[in-house]
């Protein structure tokens, strides 16, 4: 069983209900959410915030939130999720990127994957349209390039 897990995914989550995400996380995060597991989660809106809220409420796993700059510079939804789960978050890592742009998010994602045994990705797929160039896919592909396992859960 992997000891450390990166969770990555789309910021666009309005196409499914909250119940759909709860059910999906129960199926795909719960099997790895042992008390000794350590989850690395980006501090963005969308899957990051939803997974953080789910893990904080339903697991005893260690949780580290990683942001490219600072928490204060994250979207409101993400700041609220971090604040709500603060007692369950073991560490918040602020990478202090000089600018918030795609390269800063990619660096954050590589930082998490480098410290993980497994990446679970929730890319936007299907009729909602996406390409394999999204940040989620870049993270999943980076995971594979390191020879680490990845679990892809289309949203």
Image (cartoon, rainbow, N blue to C red):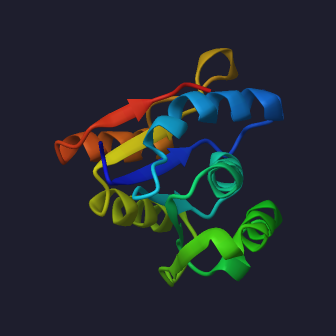
Among the 4 quarters of the image, the one containing residue 112? bottom left
Q: Quadrant of the C terminus?
A: top right
Residue 153, above or below 143: above
Among the 4 quarters of the image, the one containing residue 22? top right
Among the 4 quarters of the image, the one containing residue 109? bottom left
Residue 129, above or below 145: above
Total labels: the figure holds: 0
Q: Quadrant of the N terminus?
A: top left
In the orientation shown, which residue stands out farthest toward the left?
A: 147
Please report the residue visible at 34 percent of the width from the left and 36 percent of the height from the top.
150
Left or right relative to 81: residue 36: left
Please report the residue visible at 22 percent of the width from the left and 43 percent of the height from the top.
148
Instruction: From the top left corner, tell me how far across and down residue 5 is, in percent.
Output: 40, 51
Toward the viewer: 116 or 140? Answer: 116
Instruction: From the top left corner, tell me how far across and down residue 101 is, in percent.
Output: 55, 66
Please report the residue visible at 32 percent of the width from the left and 54 percent of the height from the top.
3
Toward the viewer: 131 or 120? Answer: 120
Residue 116, above or below 47: below
Res 29 seen here: no
Instruction: From the top left corner, tell me how far across and down residue 46 is, in percent.
Output: 70, 48
Left or right relative to 141: residue 78: right
Toward the viewer: 94 or 127? Answer: 94
Res 53 seen here: yes
In the orientation shown, which residue stands out farthest toward the top?
A: 127
Instruction: From the top left corner, tell me how far across and down residue 41 is, in percent.
Output: 53, 59
């Amino acid at each position: 069983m992997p000891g450390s897990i990166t969770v990555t995914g789309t910021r666009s989550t309005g196409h499914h209900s909250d119940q759909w995400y709860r059910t999906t996380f129960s199926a795909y995060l719960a099997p790895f959410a042992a008390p000794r597991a350590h989850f690395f989660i980006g501090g963005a809106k969308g899957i990051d915030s939803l997974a953080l809220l789910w893990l904080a409420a339903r697991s005893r796993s260690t949780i580290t939130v990683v942001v490219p700059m600072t928490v204060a510079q994250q979207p409101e939804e993400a700041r609220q999720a971090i604040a709500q789960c603060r007692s369950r978050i073991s560490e918040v890592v602020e990478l202090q990127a000089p600018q918030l742009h795609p390269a800063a998010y990619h660096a954050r994602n590589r930082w998490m994957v480098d410290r993980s045994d497994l990446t679970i990705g929730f890319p936007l797929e299907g009729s909602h349209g996406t390409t394999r160039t999204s940040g989620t896919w870049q993270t999943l592909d980076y995971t594979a390039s390191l020879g680490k396992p990845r679990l892809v859960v289309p949203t």
